[in-house]
Amino acid sequence: MILVQITDTHIDEPGTLVYGHFDTARALEDAVAAINAMDPGPGLVLHTGDIASHGSVARYQAFKAIAGELTAPMVLIPGNHDDRDALRQVFGGTPWLPTDGEYLQYVIEDHAVRIICCDSVIAGDTPGELCAERLAWLDARLGEAADRPTIVALHHPPFCSGMTGSSAKGLRQGGLELDALLRRHPQVVRVLAGHVHRPITAAFGGTIAFAGPTTCYPFGLDTGPERLLNVTHEPPAVAVHLWLEDAAPAGADLVTHILPIGEWAPPMTLLKAGVKVLAG
């Protein structure tokens, strides 16, 4: 199984540059091209939120037109910049997006790893939360298949990032409860999030939590007392999660790679099928 995670695409209306500098639509086009060029390609693309710079039907339609070029199926969850009603209006015809209830959360069952997509959004606010209702929903879904390896996905990282700006911590409340909940469900092989616009890994809930890189403008690794939040010109990227059925010594395991997006020289093949192609 190959799962590609994209996050924080921040699509704006066509022709608009986010912060006056960033063509996030073009950045998403580049990411789609890079994903489509993967060989072998992914079985699923998971978007972990902040689809648009500000949630609206027009922006989601622009996103859908670009992401519709993906050769793999895509699913998504909302982030703090998103609007649930507008998402339902544009993506409501898809089989995975719930049409009832307050929260946009659901389960993907038809892959080697089960994926539980959670809604951590507080409408109109930057931080997230997992309230008692959402925690109970997650607990029930995990209890349905205790023997299946599972990914839990949400937009806001449940751990402290070490950054001192507004992305220092994703969840305003529910983090401690989520940690305890996951420890009761050891089948969870990864917690996947977005929000912080750079790849960050931490131990959490008896498993591994990972915040994925953005497809558009990365945030800097700002850890000082000035509490800065800088946009950097590092390359955007996507995360590639590989489920390895025969990984030794632990048996099956989920392995995560970062795939930078940009204009690069073509690769130089050193070995093919174990045979040297290019002399050193």
Image (cartoon, rainbow, N blue to C red):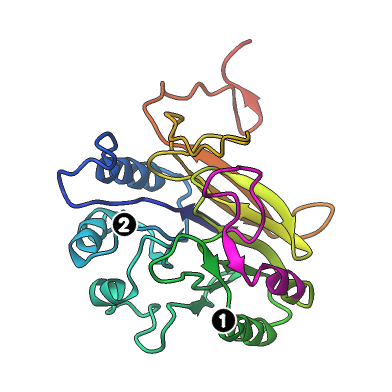
Residue at 32% from the left image edge and 55% from the top image edge: 70
Residue sitting at 43 percent across and 37 percent down? 236
Asked whether residue 173 is drawn in magenta, I would say yes
Q: Is residue 22 above or below residue 278?
A: below
Q: Residue furthest left?
A: 15
The segment highlighted magenta reads: 157-180
Task: Compare residues 48 and 130 and report the one nearer the observer.
Answer: 130
Task: Please say if 193 is above or below 14.
Answer: below
Q: Is residue 78 left or right of residue 155?
A: left
What's the amino acid at mark 1? Arg
- Under circle 2, the secondary element is loop
Amino acid at the residue labelled 2: Ala
User: Which residue in the structure is indicated by mark 1?
Assistant: 134
Residue 111, image x and y in percent?
A: 55, 70
| Residue 52, disc | 2
The vertical placement of 187 against 16, above or below, is below
Q: Residue at x 52, y 34 (%)?
A: 220
